[in-house]
């Protein structure tokens, strides 16, 4: 549905996007994660046919974004990170204007617009002028605008940017509904836990280069070398510290200040080696009540993958 092949964008000596290779299948929700200036918006602008690549190729639903831009635009709904609204329009007039721009008949628009407003939870705002809507409402209105021609692919650049917690939840629920409708969605965000909840796959981009890509679980597995193990003991905490210190795969042992019967440490071994370590600890006589791996979140993943990257 979406594919890029060595996609590159340069501005003089500056490389904004460097040989990006992506393949997003139909019906997939793909989350693009990266710091400001990483190359997310550049990628989205190229896919939306608004920016020409320096080299490489990009395809949406089989159409080349460079040589077949009109066909691409018929298949995408694009929501930029910053967008304009026409303050003199009411909400229904705003959508009616864009519907007419896509060649949708007046009769079809009269049926379609109430459905779109219901989808984005703005049914009671149809006669309200756009300029008095909250930021969250404007974001959802822009999403409705991008859906006016029923595109198969949605390209959403930071749709939850600047929203308060309630507005973020509302936006997330709308996107879940679109996912259930079978839309292919490419979405960028800094709200990493929310991407984990709603995306099938993730890509992490830094300084124009894709540094990780795959399912949420596979990217989290890239933290294999930095597992944090929590241990709860019935007694002999100091003995346990000495035991774990002797293992070369263990580092950064920390005793819990609040719960004196607990400690944690970083472990670089595999799952099988973790089981082996637990068995050895029990065989040594340690009274272990609990031994568990701390689950990492997407912030951990992002910080680990981008460790050492210069964001300046």
Image (cartoon, rainbow, N blue to C red):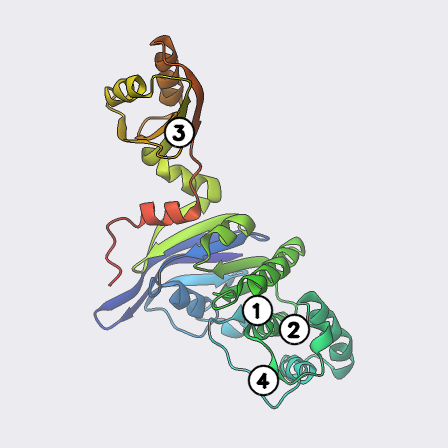
Instruction: Estimate the spatial distance between the alpha carbons at disc 3 and disc 2, rounded to whole Å.
Output: 51 Å
Compute the Cα span from label 1 to label 4: 23 Å
The residue under label 3 is: 230
| Figure quadrant of the N terminus | bottom right
Q: Nearer the viewer, residue 65 or 311?
A: 311
**Which one is in front, 280 or 150?**
280
Q: Earlier in the sequence, mark 2 or mark 1?
A: 1
Whole-number angstrom distance, CA of label 3 to CA of label 1: 46 Å
Q: Which mark is residue 77?
A: 1
Q: Residue at x 76, y 77 (%)?
A: 108
- Above or below, comparing residue 181 to residue 135 in the picture: above
Q: Secondary structure at mark 4?
A: helix
Q: Is residue 120 left or right of residue 292?
A: right
Q: Position of residue 277 (x, y in %)?
A: 35, 18
Question: What residue do we see at 36% from left, 38% from top?
Answer: 223
> Which residue is the site of mark 4?
131
Tell me if label 3 and label 2 are in contact, CB under 8 Å: no
**Label 2 element class:** loop
Q: Nearer the viewer, residue 304 or 100?
A: 304
Mark 3 or mark 2, whichever is nearer to me: 3
């Amino acid at each position: 549905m979406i594919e890029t092949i060595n996609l590159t964008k340069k501005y003089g000596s500056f490389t904004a996007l460097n040989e990006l290779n992506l393949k997003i299948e139909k019906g997939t929700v793909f989350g693009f994660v990266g710091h400001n200036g990483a190359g997310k918006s550049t990628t989205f602008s190229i896919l939306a046919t608004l920016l020409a690549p320096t080299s490489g190729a990009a395809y949406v639903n089989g159409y080349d974004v460079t040589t077949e831009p009109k066909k691409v635009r018929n298949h995408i709904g694009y929501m930029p990170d910053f967008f304009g609204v026409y303050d003199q329009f009411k909400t229904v007039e705003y959508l009616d204007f864009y519907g007419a721009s896509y060649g949708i008949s007046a009769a079809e628009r009269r049926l379609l617009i109430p459905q779109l407003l219901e989808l984005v939870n703005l049914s009671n705002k149809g006669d309200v002028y756009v300029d008095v809507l909250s930021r969250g409402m404007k974001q959802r209105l822009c999403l409705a605008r991008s859906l006016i021609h029923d595109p198969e692919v949605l390209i959403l650049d930071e749709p939850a940017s600047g929203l308060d917690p309630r507005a973020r939840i509302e936006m997330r629920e709308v996107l879940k509904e679109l996912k259930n409708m079978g839309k292919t969605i490419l979405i960028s965000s800094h709200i990493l836990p929310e991407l984990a909840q709603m995306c099938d796959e993730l890509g992490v981009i830094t300084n124009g280069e894709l540094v990780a890509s795959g399912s949420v679980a596979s990217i989290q597995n890239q933290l294999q070398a930095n597992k944090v193990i929590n241990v709860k003991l019935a007694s002999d905490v100091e003995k346990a510290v000495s035991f774990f210190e002797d293992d070369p795969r263990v580092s950064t042992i920390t005793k819990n200040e609040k719960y004196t019967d607990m400690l944690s440490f970083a472990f670089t071994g595999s799952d099988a080696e973790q089981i082996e370590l637990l068995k050895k600890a029990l065989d040594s006589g340690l009274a272990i009540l609990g031994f568990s791996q701390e689950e990492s979140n997407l912030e951990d993943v992002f910080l680990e993958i981008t460790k050492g990257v210069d964001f300046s």
